[in-house]
Image (cartoon, rainbow, N blue to C red):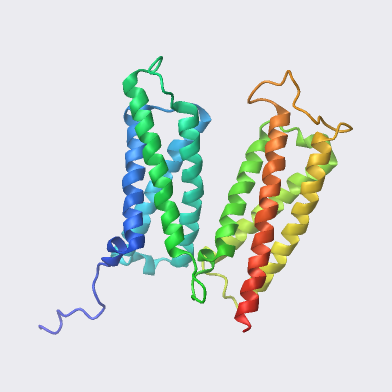
Amino acid sequence: AGKMMESTGGPYLNTAAVTSPVGIARLLQMTFGCATFSLVAHQGGFSAAYGTFCMFVWTFCFAVTVFVVTCEFTHLHSCLSISWGNFTAAFAMLATLMSVTAAVIYPLYFVQLECYPIGCEVRDFRIAASVFAGLLFFAYASEVFLTRAKPGQVTSYMATVSGLLKIVQAFVACIIFGALVNDSQYGKYVATQWCVAVYSFCFVVTVVVVAFSVTGKTALPWFPFERSVVIYTFGAVLLYVSAAVIWPVFCFDSKYGSPRRPGLCAKGKCPWDSQLVVAIFTYVNLLLYVVDLAYSQRIRFISHL
């Protein structure tokens, strides 16, 4: 009977999930995240779309981090039909990007040095929330730094530079889409509609690549995943080059658009501003895809040594 009581599967709880450097980073994420949205909800306050976005970021990241820590601590992740390493690496990168965005937006719109008209207590709560929002970003960035692929290490695709760049590319595309729907007048010309098609196609395929990685469907014998991703990245570079040439011409050339910001344009509702944001982030994503392609080639080169 004594032998029947013995455990043969090892410890039920994984203490390394909370004592390892990555585990400690996740505990800090939970602490800072909870502190941030609690301060805002209790007294700091938020309003409009950008305030709602910040609250969504903090609550969403907190909930997923609690889920990750719980699964690792109890070994429940072994019951899930996903690639856990890819999932946690992808989420850490996404949370880093979302938290740094919220850490910039909230103080920009809600923090002021004077007490009038919101009152000193509300001001202090907002400043404290902004500090914790900044600490939250560093906590997620530290996880990305700790879990990223080291040279010569066999690791999850999403933990490699190429995998992490996929998350950044998709995030930048979301910023582009946000600017496009904010009265960018992209429907005026077929050429600018082509640019929107480029952004949409590359975003969808990038999300599909991430989804395949997270769900562990990259090792299918009939589908050469790595080769397909490299070919797609090369195609994305060419498509973004075309958009990087076409968009500025049809938005800022005097023949089609306006080289300078119109004087009577209202702040926040000016098509020229949205067009400029799209142009800037088109070049950002082009650079990201070029770096991604270069790194993909480097991986293939090293693997053949």
User: Image check: 298 left or right of 94?
Assistant: right
Front-lying residue, 13 or 40: 40
Examine the image and state in which quarter residue 15 appears.
bottom left
Q: Give the position of the C terminus as an image quadrant.
A: bottom right
116 sits to left or right of 215: left
Does residue 60 appear left or right of residue 225 in this picture? left
Spot occupied by residue 303 in the image (x, y as percentages of width and height): 60, 80
For residue 10, what is the image quadrant?
bottom left
Q: In percent of the image, x 70 and y 46: which residue is there? A: 282
Visible residue check, residue 180: no
Q: Is residue 22 above or below residue 274?
A: below
Residue at x 46%, y 33% (from the top left corner)? 106
What residue do we see at 61% from left, 73% from top? 299
Q: Residue furthest front?
A: 113
x 65%, y 77%: residue: 301
Q: Nearer the viewer, residue 55 or 96?
A: 96
